[in-house]
Image (cartoon, rainbow, N blue to C red):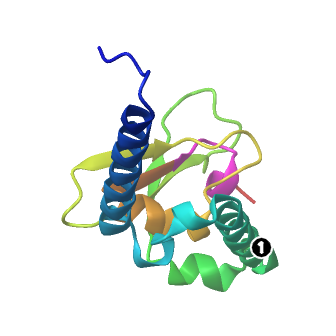
Amino acid sequence: YTLLTRRDAVDELRDMRGGLQTRIREWADDESDADMVGWWKDPEGTQEKIRKKQEGFERDLLEQDRVVKLSCLENSGMAEYTIPLTNRYKRASNERGVLTVKQDVSNVNALLWIPGRNDSFFHVHVLQRFLDAGFDVFALDLRRCGRAKVG
């Protein structure tokens, strides 16, 4: 330990700290994305820029057409399989389950989506995200629900 009694010792430590800060900032710039280089010069401004970018992203999502149209479902490329039911407690003879599937040959994980009552898998806007994340999507509509409703 050095007793900081000499003025030049304090100045020397200050210079060492400055050199360390410079090396840390250079490292941060080298490891950052291009739009984040120099963030340390104006951290508050950088936070504001990130916040505005996030707000724009969220606004774009909200402005998208959120109504699911039949064409969206048809264009999703999901395969639909009818599962006949043999249960003696069926209300109608043609009651069924429906399995809707979208797979990618490179995926090794599976997501089983079992919607609640009066729902079905209409979320084609997130379908590609699941596939890109490595998950095949299997949506099972139970009898009298969603695509399995008998008219």
Q: Does the magenta run of residues contain 125? A: no
Q: Quarter-wise, where is residue 41 in the image? A: bottom right
Q: Residue at x 79, y 72 (%)?
A: 62
What amino acid does circle 1 point to?
A: Arg
Which residue shows up at 64% across the image and 85% down it? 71
Of 96 and 140, the residue lying toward us: 140
Q: Nearer the viewer, residue 110 or 1?
A: 1
User: Is disc 1 surrounded by few (<14), some (14 to 19) or many (20+) residues within 10 Å?
Assistant: few
Q: Which residue is mark 1?
A: 66
Indicate the position of residue 131 as horizontal and vertical percent values.
Answer: 37, 63
Q: Quadrant of the N terminus?
A: top left
- Depicted 90 relative to depicted 21: above or below: above
Left or right relative to 127: residue 123? right
Q: Horizontally, is 144 left or right of 137 in the view?
A: right
Camera sees residue 6: yes
Quadrant in which the C terminus is drawn: bottom right
Quadrant in the picture for residue 66: bottom right
Q: Is residue 59 above or below residue 93?
A: below
Q: Residue 80: tell me if it is visible.
A: no
Classify residue 130 as left or right of residue 98: left
Residue at disc 1, secondary structure = loop
Residue drawn at the location 45% of the way across and 34% of the way down = 7
Q: Position of residue 107 (x, y in %)?
A: 24, 58
Give the total number of marks visible in the rendering. 1
Which residues are the magenta region? Answer: 140-149
Q: Position of residue 120 (x, y in %)?
A: 65, 54
Q: Position of residue 29 (x, y in %)?
A: 37, 67
